[in-house]
Image (cartoon, coloured by chain):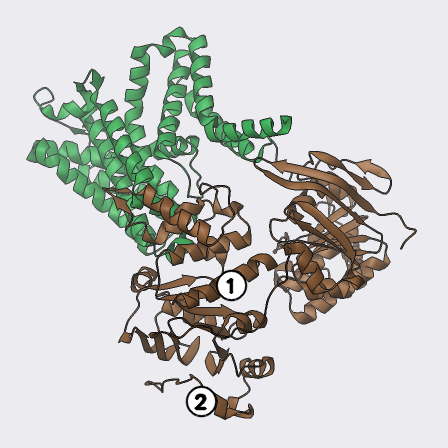
Chain colours: A green, B brown
């Protein structure tokens, strides 16, 4: 009996390990600094995680389909710069759809390369990380972008507004998460994403179009990056060209922390949300216990490696692998 | 060997996994110099037993003895140190390294400063290779060797430790007949050294050729151990499944329906040329030929995975151009592919979702997938095909080969196809499930499906088919009816010997063999 109980615990840890780790962090940081778990702090963590979070939701689709998207950071910078520039030229009501259309075009291009031409997604999106950065600089002429009349625009509502007593970025994150969560878990498209990521050959042999499924995943990722860019632009109403630089790695970290496999075929939106929150709370907690900002980069990655290790350990029931 | 003591003895081994009693009091012993077969259907507990022996699983109760001493196999390394050596079905060699490096990997002989002593390494290796009597030397790159020779490298590696018991797990799965002979010689040599050998295989003829005793497991339970010399294939099969495998010829018991599929003069580059055949509803058409004869490629063309370079495909009498698998599926052509795990299933996905995958777009309630409809489909075929799984939530990768194949078949039956193509229906499947799948294929025909069965196993083709298309080197040699075909004529045909040497042309003309004249030449 003892053996079965142990296995059940192992299975439970394997499934819920990330939630347990999440609560362990919360408790640990709260003991270290009681300010950590106050409503104000929690809201501020979630709000500052919203931009990263929205991007991670889109990347979750790409990762489950068995691919990577390292271009989302650059794409978010692009959206931010474009929407700020167009804001003064054609007005916010037109600037937003125009920015979405341009970002989706970039996503479609990546989707075409990875889906239709079957190019390696790591190479394609790493290249696009650089190419889109160049595109942004070309577009802006390398200058920072600012809205002329910062007080008089309704555009600030996405980043600074409040509704239902909550900051709008949080509401947008929750809304996108709820919508994409339903798409992934309840629709036939979601099922196809898992099928293509689990075994793309077998999916093809079941009549599932791999190319189109992958293509749509990159569109979703681009739409999420554009939404993140919208929040970013609206929050600051001015931006550097490099605002999203490096975010692609944090996004990927959140998705992995949530437990999606980089091999494809597994992961959920809920888990990614947990991954995003863990990352946000860790970074916030480290600041609250007085660690220098720069240390965050190191600690974040140590924790991610630990999380991945514990995840694998729970799956095989042992901390160490005996087979080298 | 009566007065000798067993090298290895397992007593009353019990191993449970959540929900499954994988081993239920299994006992088993190997004498020195004995080849002991371990048999059972997939899922009978052979692999679990071997994992217990190899230290990968710990038994819940029961003891392992080596000689007189009880031992505990705490892990794979410990099992190896105690002289338990596995030769796995899937090879675990580093292809880019030499034979010698692979054999002594981790234990390379060294000189001062940790430099590898290459001369000594080559000498040691060649000494072992000489014992095995193989045709390659220590410096050959492993990736350049045939599968059979790679297996020899594994065996050579086993010989470097002081092996007490060597376990062969389906060693002949990918060997040719002549390579098998070499392997059996090596096993015979091993016997001379008083090593105990455990031999796991589904192939009866091998078991009866080389083993001394046979132990049979069924559903995790010990069924008994028999002397090979006192047994027959039937009696062993009986122990394994509780009945015997029926491979008698099929005689069609129902009238054939309309023409379902006609293929006229179909060619696909160099893969196959000028192929013509037809299948009626209610008929099983067998395709037989050597690997590379073009059988699978024809199936792939019909399923929209390849574009033919010439010829016509007629479905229900109308010419069709099949552009993709989804197009083929929409037209009512389904394919159970030869590589079940690679092409047929998404192993990490659950049983139900695998089964409903091709029609997922059609199963809608509002914007979402109708899970109730999915479960209904699963339940229907779960019962109809007698699929053994604790629940639909089980990942397909955890099922046995036979049950996996039933999931694939269920997937296509739920689409109610006009033509069902089954490529290697029972590859890697145990005897019991084999006969179930044979029955199923016949039952499908009698329900009015047009079934195409491609197989490399002659008894299987002869057993299930109403007619048999024989292929050689990309061409159809002859189409036989089940009444006229004999093993000899079939072998002649697939070896490229022209049909005119076969007597009894009258029977052919009088049969249902109106092979259409190719339109393209």
Q: Horizontal and vertical percent for residue A174?
A: 27, 27
Residue highlighted by disc 2: B510
Give the residue drawn at x 47%, y 48%: B347
User: Residue B19 vs residue B2: left or right?
Assistant: left
Outermost residue toward the top in this view:
A34
Work out whether residue B27 or residue B323 is closer to the camera in this orientation and state it.
Answer: B27
User: Residue B496 vs residue B218: left or right?
Assistant: left
Work out whether residue B239 or residue B127 is closer to the camera in this orientation and state it.
Answer: B239
Q: Crowding near pointer 1: few (<14 within 10 Å), some, many (20+)?
A: some
Instruction: Specify the quadrant that holds the N terminus of chain A.
Output: top right
Work out whether residue B269 or residue A265 is closer to the camera in this orientation and state it.
Answer: A265
Residue highlighted by disc 1: B439
Would you say residue B341 is visible in this rendering?
no
Work out whether residue A229 or residue B407 is closer to the camera in this orientation and state it.
Answer: B407
Tell me the quarter of the picture where residue B372 sits: top left
Query: Of marks 1 and 2, which one's residue comes earlier in the chain?
Result: 1
User: Residue B18 vs residue B51: left or right?
Assistant: left
Report the label total.
Answer: 2
């Amino acid at each position: 009996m003892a053996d079965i109980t142990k296995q059940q615990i192992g299975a439970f840890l394997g499934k819920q390990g990330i939630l347990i780790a999440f609560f362990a962090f919360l408790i640990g940081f709260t003991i270290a600094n009681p300010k950590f778990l106050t409503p104000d702090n929690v809201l501020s963590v979630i709000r500052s995680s919203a931009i990263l979070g929205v991007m991670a939701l889109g990347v979750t689709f790409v990762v489950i389909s068995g691919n990577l998207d390292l271009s989302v950071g650059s794409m978010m910078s692009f959206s931010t710069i474009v929407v700020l520039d167009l804001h003064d030229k054609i007005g916010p009501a037109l600037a937003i759809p125009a920015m979405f259309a341009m970002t989706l075009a970039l996503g479609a291009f990546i989707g075409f390369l990875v889906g239709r031409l079957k190019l390696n997604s790591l190479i394609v999106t790493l290249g696009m990380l650089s190419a889109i950065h160049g595109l942004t600089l070309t577009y802006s002429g390398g200058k920072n972008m600012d809205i002329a009349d910062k007080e008089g625009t309704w555009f600030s509502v996405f980043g600074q507004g409040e509704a239902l007593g909550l900051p709008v970025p949080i509401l947008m994150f929750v809304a996108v998460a709820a919508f994409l969560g339903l798409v992934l878990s309840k629709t036939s498209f979601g099922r196809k994403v898992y099928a293509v990521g689990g075994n793309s050959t077998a999916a093809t042999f079941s009549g599932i179009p791999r190319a189109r499924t992958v293509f749509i995943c990159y569109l979703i990722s681009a739409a999420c990056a554009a939404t993140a860019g919208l929040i970013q632009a609206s929050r600051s109403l001015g931006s550097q060209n490099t605002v999203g630089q490096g975010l692609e790695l944090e996004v990927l970290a959140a998705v992995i922390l949530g437990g999606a496999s980089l091999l494809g075929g597994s992961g959920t939106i809920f888990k990614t949300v947990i991954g995003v929150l863990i990352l946000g709370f860790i970074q916030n907690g480290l600041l609250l216990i007085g660690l220098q900002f720069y240390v965050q980069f190191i600690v974040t990655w140590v924790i991610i490696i630990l999380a991945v290790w514990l995840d694998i350990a729970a799956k095989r029931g042992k901390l160490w692998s005996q087979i080298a | 060997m009566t007065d000798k003591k067993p090298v290895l003895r397992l007593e009353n081994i019990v191993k449970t996994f959540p929900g499954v009693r994988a081993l239920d009091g299994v006992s088993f012993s190997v004498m020195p110099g004995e080849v002991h077969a371990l048999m059972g259907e997939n899922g009978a507990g052979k692999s679990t037993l071997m994992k217990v022996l190899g230290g990968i699983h710990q038994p819940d109760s029961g003891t392992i003895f080596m000689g007189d001493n009880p031992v505990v196999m705490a892990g794979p390394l410990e099992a190896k140190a105690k002289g338990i050596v596995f030769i796995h079905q899937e090879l675990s060699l580093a292809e880019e390294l030499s034979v010698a490096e692979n054999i002594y990997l981790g234990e390379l002989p060294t000189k001062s400063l940790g430099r590898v002593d290459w001369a000594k390494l080559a000498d040691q290796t060649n000494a072992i290779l000489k014992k095995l009597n193989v045709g390659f030397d220590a410096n050959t790159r492993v990736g350049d060797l045939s599968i059979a020779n790679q297996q020899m490298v594994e065996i050579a590696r086993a010989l470097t430790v002081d092996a007490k018991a060597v376990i062969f797990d389906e060693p002949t799965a990918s060997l040719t007949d002549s390579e098998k002979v070499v392997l059996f010689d090596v096993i015979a040599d091993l016997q001379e050294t008083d090593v105990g050998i455990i031999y796991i295989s589904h192939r009866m003829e091998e078991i009866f050729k080389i083993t001394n005793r046979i132990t049979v497991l069924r559903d995790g339970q010990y069924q008994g151990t028999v002397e090979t010399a006192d047994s027959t294939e039937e009696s062993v099969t009986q122990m394994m499944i509780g009945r015997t495998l029926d491979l008698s010829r099929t005689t069609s018991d129902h009238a054939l329906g309309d023409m379902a599929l006609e293929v006229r003069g179909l060619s696909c580059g160099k893969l196959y040329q000028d192929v013509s055949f037809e299948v009626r509803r209610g008929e099983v058409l067998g395709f037989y030929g050597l690997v590379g004869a073009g059988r699978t490629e024809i199936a792939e063309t019909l399923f929209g995975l390849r574009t033919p370079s010439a010829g016509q495909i007629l479905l229900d009498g109308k010419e069709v151009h099949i552009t993709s698998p989804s197009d083929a599926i929409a037209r009512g052509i389904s394919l159970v592919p030869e590589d079940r795990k690679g092409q047929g299933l998404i192993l990490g996905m659950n049983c139900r979702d695998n089964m409903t995958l091709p029609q997922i777009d059609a199963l809608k309630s509002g914007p979402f997938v109708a899970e109730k409809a999915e479960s209904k489909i699963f339940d229907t075929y779960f019962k109809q095909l007698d699929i053994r799984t604790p629940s639909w939530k089980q990942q397909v990768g955890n099922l046995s080969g036979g049950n996996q194949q039933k999931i694939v078949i269920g997937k296509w039956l739920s689409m109610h196809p006009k033509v069902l193509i089954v490529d290697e229906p029972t590859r890697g499947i145990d005897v019991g499930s084999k006969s179930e799948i044979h029955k199923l294929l016949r039952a499908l025909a009698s329900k009015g499906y047009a079934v195409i069965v491609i197989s490399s196993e002659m008894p299987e083709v002869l057993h299930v088919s109403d007619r048999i298309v024989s292929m050689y080197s990309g061409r159809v040699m002859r189409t036989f009816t089940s009444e006229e075909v004999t093993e000899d004529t079939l072998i002649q045909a697939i070896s490229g010997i022209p049909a005119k040497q076969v007597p009894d042309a009258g029977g052919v003309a009088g049969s249902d063999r109106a092979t259409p004249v190719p339109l393209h030449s």
